[in-house]
Amino acid sequence: MPRGTFDRSVRRARTRAQLLEAAARVYSDHGVEGATLDEVAEEAGYTKGAVYDHFGSKDSLLFALLDEYLAGEVAEQVAIFEAHREAPERPRIGADRWVEHLEQDPSAFQLFIEAWVRGQRDPEVRARVLAAIEPMREMFRTFGQERAAEHGEARSEVLTEGAADIMAALGVGFALLKLTDPERVPSRLLGIAYLVFIVALTTSPEARALIEGAFD
């Protein structure tokens, strides 16, 4: 690759990263509806044209932020999964780390909720929300499949899918409750809920049958 092409690609990647960082701050301060691309450009030290060049619209910028946030969370959870393969409390370790992130900076999750609310009224936004959360659902599917393989369990595709959706729903629902009532909701509760659910899934044929029956 000619050096000039490489330099341009590096500069473009740097500009994109700076615009995302600025958008995270502006969206956090004003919300998605209240933020403008002019404010994002000013915060980043670029023109509005640069924002359009990289993202095209305020919605595209929002979903680029969400994709980056969720990709980072998934990557860390996969690393935790691999590092604690022999630990029975592996799901709790991952959950505790995610809750720690949530408590340190809830802004990215709050943006996800804003996007979800808009998606209830706008089918196009809803489709993008679904696409954004699919890597998280796939992560839980993979975790479930690997855990079953480690224990010599045979799980149907329906059971794997249902268990993954329950894990994702527990995480999202817990985050909503934790941010709403932080003093009352213990930070460790999500990890404990995951452990309870996984034990039931592993040891109880009745629990597995109930989950599979939900898809009938």
Image: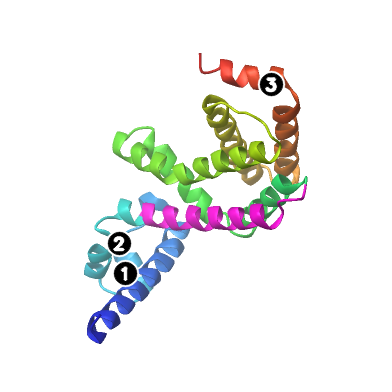
Q: Which amino acid, mark 1?
A: Ala
Taking depth in this image into account, of 192 and 2 the one nearest to the observer is 2
Local crowd size for mark 1, using a 10 Å CA cut-off: few (<14), some (14–19), many (≥20): many
Residue 207 numbered mark, or none: 3
Q: Which amino acid, mark 3?
A: Ala
Residue marked by disc 1: 41
Mark closer to the observer (3, 1) = 3
Q: CA distance from mark 3 to mark 2?
A: 49 Å
Q: Height in image: 14 above or below 164?
A: below
Extreme residue toward the front, this view: 152
Q: Is residue 109 visible?
A: yes
Quadrant of the rendering where the N terminus is positioned: bottom left
Residue marked by disc 2: 37
N-term-proximal mark, 3 vs 2: 2
Q: Is residue 187 visible?
A: no
Q: Is residue 177 magenta?
A: no
Q: Do the CB atoms of the residues marked 1 and 2 lie less than 8 Å apart?
A: yes
Q: Height in image: 169 above or below 5?
A: above
Local crowd size for mark 2, using a 10 Å CA cut-off: few (<14), some (14–19), many (≥20): many
Which image quadrant for residue 2? bottom left
- Residue at the spot 72% in from the left edge and 43% down from the top edge: 191
Residue range in magenta is: 62-87
Looking at the rendered structure, the secondary structure element under dot 1 is helix
Q: Is residue 81 magenta?
A: yes
Q: Which amino acid, mark 2?
A: Leu
Looking at the rendered structure, the secondary structure element under dot 3 is helix
Q: Magenta residues: mostly which secondary structure?
A: helix
